[in-house]
Amino acid sequence: MSKSVEHELELLREEIRRHDELYYQQAKPEISDQAYDALLRKLKDLEQAHPELITPDSPSQRVGGSALRAFAAVRHGIPMISIDNTYSEGEVREFDQRVRKLLDGQAFSYICEPKIDGVSLSLRYENGLLTQAATRGDGEHGDDVTANARTMYDIPLRLIDPKNPVGGDFPKHVPPVLEVRGETYLTRMQFVTINQRQEAMGEEPYANPRNTAAGTLKLLDPRAVAARKLRFLPHGQGVVEGFEFSTYQQWLNYLKVLGFPVSEHIAPAEDIDAALQFIHQFNIQRKNLPYDTDGVVLKVNRLAQRRELGTTSRAPRWCIAFKYQPEQAETQLARVVFQVGKTGTITPVAEFEPPVFISGTQVYRASLHNFDEITRKDIRLYDQVIVQKAGEVIPYVVGSVAAKRPAEALIIAPPTTCPSCGSPAVRDGGFVRCQNLACPAQREERLLFFGARDQMDIENLGPAVVQQLIGKGLVKTLPDLYRLTLTDLTGLDRMGEKSAATLIAAIADSKSRGLERLLGGLGILHVGVRTAEDIAGHFSTLDSLANASINDFEAVEGVGEVVAQSLHRFLHELGGIELLRELEQLGVKTTPARVRPTGGPLAGKIVVVTGKLQRYDRHEIQSLIESLGGKAGDSVSKNTHLLVAGEDAGSKLAKARKLGVEVIDEAEFLKRIGII
């Protein structure tokens, strides 16, 4: 192989990396977008001619490969725990007093950092190369989104080797393992661009930048992610091997050297007064930033002091987030419309005139949740109402302005018939429900829910496709979905042969999901994913489900009276058994995908785990229990056989002792199951 080609490729890559840094990190581009595209095209052409010379850190590899089938689970080396937050300056000062007390007279300082309204991400580098990117997930486990992270130009694919950095207080080479935690976000301008594209395609616009960023990060096609232009800013440290940093400021400075963008609004504060002064100043500055922020995070700067302060069971003791009070606006409740959900619940939705601008977006409408809530808040049609966003994301009505109530204000009465199908609407506490499973509005919501990732996981069965399938009469019931042909689908808008074949294959693939996913996907009132797994594990065939009484259902751990009645009614009054048998005839699996062992040391026992274990995380211990014939319970009840108590065990331990449930520690549990 010619050395000149290798040399030319490396020169091209270095030049493109330099322009990436100028554009994304320094905001000082030297060349036009067209000139940059020409360089990238030249690199791709040369690599295509010499594929053996393509490297994983090449700029050409930011978007490549086919769509993913699913995201693998990742266990974080250091948990990504949440932080405490407050809206009160007094509580910030109380936090400072706690830190002073715990540090027992030691001098300390803070770093003040903007709290970006985005999605947490952890990046792992091994020998300077990006090897993994993972979402926060539940803090212990996240999803592997490496392919999507590689599309973000703020994230280096290869770290710059510092060698002899200015200042000399950094490692001379990139540590063998280095994890960078940070926030993924969309700029406001990019969010507007995305919504313009949505509307141009006849799709509903997205609600806000944060939710859109979260959804984008979980797309299975990296090319679609690349088109959204997600951004990234670092704000924390994960696992680091080979070097120990002394302060957070040193860590941030090092990240700049490695090629990461670091917020220019991060500032040191020698004491709490200086920190609060920064909080006040930043509240003015943040409105001019290109991205959304909802507060300021105060962090103890010295890392050794952080270790000394430690964490509670929920959050670190060395940091706190001060969140700005959410914006509120006053407007008129002009209309109330009724929306029908997948379970037939009819939700009242407020529409405002004029719309109000809150936390970066125009708000036209908001859910009123249920009719008890409307009564409690004394909200009436034509009232002046106060609107704000929960967490600066979800708009809701705080209440009415009683002093401004007009004479024509009307009480909001629950509907007596379904607004979609005209069937009688039945009152159920604060809710009103349509009980007609053939209701068109329910049909659309049920089909979308049925195909969602946590249910039957049918890729590409999105809102636009579902609306057409129902609108053209191709799908009237769930079984109709499994009767679709290529000819049916290729007649839909924006659905070519390739897309149609992909959807048909995804529908066929969903047949093997098993009874637990099938039950969870039917939208049965009060039956969620975990309950569906419990029911499928206990009643493993359609015959046993059909023959079960309400008492039989209620006897299953975790299934109470309300759930048992709802499930029995769905199966026997609403045609659920007939629906399941029809799906079975079409090849849909109606036995559990996961069969619990009938033998083993925990056979027939319900085991609950509480507190932190040394050897297993929560998911691992639950899987272990079920592999040994037991059932991993979520809560302690009179039916619980055993409670395994780890460190910091709380209310479950107290309840187990009160009920007389046997309590053992982790070592005794492992001894009983034969591991030690």
Image (cartoon, rainbow, N blue to C red):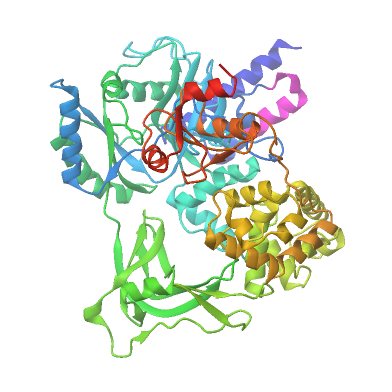
In the rendered view, would you say 374 is above or below 66?
A: below
Q: Would you say the magenta stretch is mainly helix, strand or loop?
A: helix
Q: Give how far across and how far down residue 175 sits, in percent.
A: 47, 14
Give whichever of 108, 617 is nearer the camera. Answer: 617
Q: Is residue 125 left or right of residue 268?
A: right
Is residue 114 highlighted in magenta? no
Which quarter of the figure has residue 171?
A: top left
Give whichever of 142, 539 is nearer the camera. Answer: 539
Numbered range of the magenta stretch: 38-54
Which residue corresponds to the image point at 72% horizontal and 46% vertical from the top-left? Answer: 592
Give whichever of 653, 113 is nearer the camera. Answer: 653
Which residue corresponds to the image point at 55% horizontal and 26% vertical from the top-left? Answer: 157
Give whichever of 175, 140 is nearer the camera. Answer: 140
Q: Give how far across and how far down residue 117 sits, in percent.
A: 39, 46
Q: Count the marks.
A: 0
Q: Is residue 91 left or right of residue 7?
A: left
Q: Is residue 285 left or right of residue 425?
A: left
| Residue 524 in sight in this render | no
